[in-house]
Amino acid sequence: MRGNGFVLILSIAFFILIDWYVFTGVKALTDLLSPNARKWIHISYWTVTAWSISVLLATFAGYFHAWPMWFRTLSMCVIMVLLLCKIIFILFLIVDDLKRLVQFVFGKFTSTGSVDTADIAKGISRSDFLLKAGLFVSAIPFVGMTYGVLVGAHDYTVRRKRVVLKNLPKAWNGLKIVQLSDIHAGSFYNKAAVERGIALVMKQKPDIIFFTGDLVNNIAAEMDEYIDVFGKLSAPLGIYSTLGNHDYGDYVAWETPEAKRENLNQLIGVHKKMGWDILMNEHRILKREGSEIAILGIENWGAKGNFPKYGKMHKAYPGTEHVPVKLLLSHDPSHWDAEILEKYKDIDIMFAGHTHGMQFGIEKGPIKWSPVQWMYKQWAGLYEKQGQYLYVNRGFGFLGFPGRVGMAPEVTVMELISGQ
């Protein structure tokens, strides 16, 4: 406990030090304003600082988790965004202070007579240009992330793909699959916007719907307010789902192992209550005009980081050997390279999610970039190797940062075309 207290003191000291240094720049920028305007800007600045420190103290004291999820998410978002903006502004302040230091030293050694060094220092004012440039540049992430929260978080985007499969029976030609992934219900704060997203899904008139994991952040109860929303999803051939790494409650300190297992059972029950056929290392075979396709679904299996390997292809696969086309639901895209391409060369398409495209990136024309690509080779969109395909959905919801910048929440519509 003593160690935690030391960390808390250091954290508060860090925040105060940053805010004091940034305030020296804010104070200089407001020098030409009226006394009343300057007063209110200064009060507002330190009020926000006091609020940030209060949230930090509440988190340390354990009160933070008693607050509503939307408030916790937005609070941490505001604090982190403001911290990022302040750090950027500090870079300009450092450049300005280095410039002032050079001027001070130069003035001291070139002055004639007995000139007080304090007078030299007073005569060196901060650079108006650098302060304004710092304010402008530091405002960019604030504006971008604010847009990402207010607009980007619920800017549901339909991404369409057509995939030709040489073994797809003609009876299945034109099959329209809608894929959703990474709902993360515990992060939602705008139910009406989520309902618009579900309406957009149904507008696509899917033949079948796939959901590839992470229905919640941690606990099944996160879905209580959204069962009615996602329960509106329907498709003639059904809705098939599987689990992601967040669905197991691995990131929660449970009182007992039994409580954790009960939470998972409740979450599986939520899938079933909504009419979703959850695939736990198993498969389903669908028939149309005498022709078959197989849908396989496994539990989370990740090859990167410390993500769990609960998935068991050796249980899901048997019984599908004779089926000409196999579609796999597996949450983590690293599973494709690590196991599917090596051992299961007749899996035609694997549907995944997990990465969220890091909820931040650039996808304009030939440019496709996100920091998440430093960890995952396949992180968003359609990939192909030796006739096998992987589609990585960018996610429907969000986690951590309650928004998206340049990486819109996705509704995938994939049409399968027979190559026969």
Image (tube, rainbow, N blue to C red):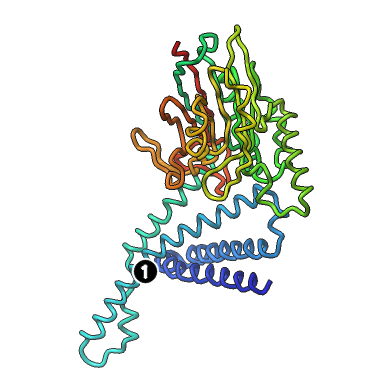
- Out of 219 and 71, give the one closest to the viewer: 219
Q: Is residue 140 left or right of residue 334?
A: left
Q: Is residue 46 left or right of residue 236?
A: left
When the figure is inspected, residue 115 is found, relative to residue 187, above or below; the finding is below
**What residue appears at the point 72 percent right and 38 percent down from the top-left corner?**
267
Going by the picture, which residue comes out furthest to the top? 289
**What residue appears at the point 59 percent right and 14 percent down from the top-left corner?**
292
When the figure is inspected, residue 359 is found, relative to residue 231, above or below; the finding is below
- Out of 40 and 231, give the one closest to the viewer: 231
Q: Is residue 104 left or right of residue 185?
A: left
- Residue 91 image position (x, y, % from top left): 38, 64
User: Quadrant location of residue 225?
Assistant: top right
**What residue appears at the point 54 percent right and 29 percent down from the top-left corner?**
411
Residue wearing tag 1: 94
User: Quadrant location of residue 123?
Assistant: bottom left
Q: Quadrant of the N terminus?
A: bottom right
Of helix, strand and loop, which one carries label 1?
helix
